[in-house]
Amino acid sequence: MTDVNETYGKLQSTDGPHRDADLSELRQYSTAWQDGSIPQQQGRIVDIQLGNFRSGVVDPVFAALIQSLDKIPESELSILDAACASGYYSEVIERAKPQAAYTGSDYSAAMIDEARRRYPDRTFLVENACKMSFADRAFDCVMLSGAIEHIPEYDQAIAEICRVAGRYVILHRVPMILAKKARMTLSTQYQVETPRIFLPHGEIVERMAEHGFGLRDERAVYKSGLRHEIARRVRRQRPDIRTLLFARES
């Protein structure tokens, strides 16, 4: 097993300094993840995670997604990975749902190029999660992983993925807080300054309900100790990385 933590910490640490910013400032960095240097840097982490995964060692972020997918009873379903990056989650989804039809999309053309290089037999499209070209309810399940916190207009992204989803939505790796109001910050990941928004748990659930989706399953991606849990509940702005499964109710 190769340890991914050191590489992750160097390239995409989420524990570094965060500078509070308002929405107008975050919008100036809304294209940050289209930077052409990111696919290669992210690939260094992904290659370790996938190498371990193929050897039977499942990274916590992969395990949380698999467990959420296991809560979906259908075996044959279409899945849109709406911020697919280099498409690596297609391997995880295939493990959990081998009969699923996978499509990946991302607003970064550089990421889609990398995804097509890595997985030439799978479908990848350049799409903005805030305004996609797909028809209403085009996919049985839409997944958004590690992306919503980087989208200043995250409410638009929620509305859009709910529009495109027929039955289920998975919000994977969301930094959630117990506060009533989102904390908007700027931080550096992959040496690129990017928005990072800490989202209130209640707001996410309420916004999903407005679009006809109810919470069906929720889990922490990483195990946290007692000190972290106390800080999260007392300070209410200490994030917890979570994966949530929603099902359409109307």
Image (cartoon, helix red, strand yellow):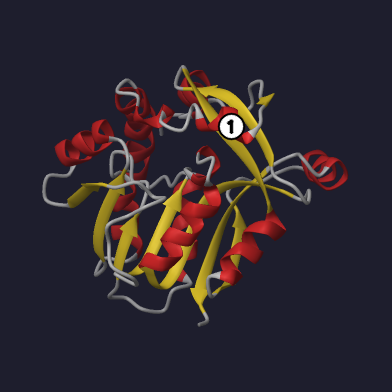
Q: Total of numbered circles in the picture?
A: 1
Disc 1 target residue = 24
Q: Quadrant of the N terminus?
A: top left
Residue 64 visible? The answer is no
In this view, the residue in front, 76 or 179, is 179
Assign a secondary structure to mark 1. helix
Q: Is residue 28 left or right of residue 136?
A: right
Q: Is residue 73 left or right of residue 230?
A: left
Residue 241 visible? The answer is yes
In this view, the residue in front, 10 or 55, is 10
Neighbours of disc 1 within 10 Å: few (<14), some (14-19), many (20+): few
In this view, the residue in front, 65 or 195, is 195
Rendered position, 46 above or below 76: above
Look at label 1 and name its amino acid.
Ser
- Most extreme residue toward the front is 24
Identify which residue is drawn at 61% across, 58% down.
219
Identify which residue is drawn at 41% across, 57% down.
143
In this view, the residue in front, 229 or 171, is 171
Give percent across and percent down for residue 76: 27, 75
Identify which residue is drawn at 31% across, 28% down.
39
Q: Is residue 125 left or right of residue 163?
A: left
Give percent across and percent down for residue 88: 31, 44
Give percent across and percent down for residue 186: 60, 26
- Most extreme residue toward the bottom is 250
Rendered position, 42 above or below 233: above
Rendered position, 226 above or below 205: above
- Picture quarter containing residue 234? top right
- Picture quarter containing residue 120? top left
Give percent across and percent down for residue 12: 49, 26
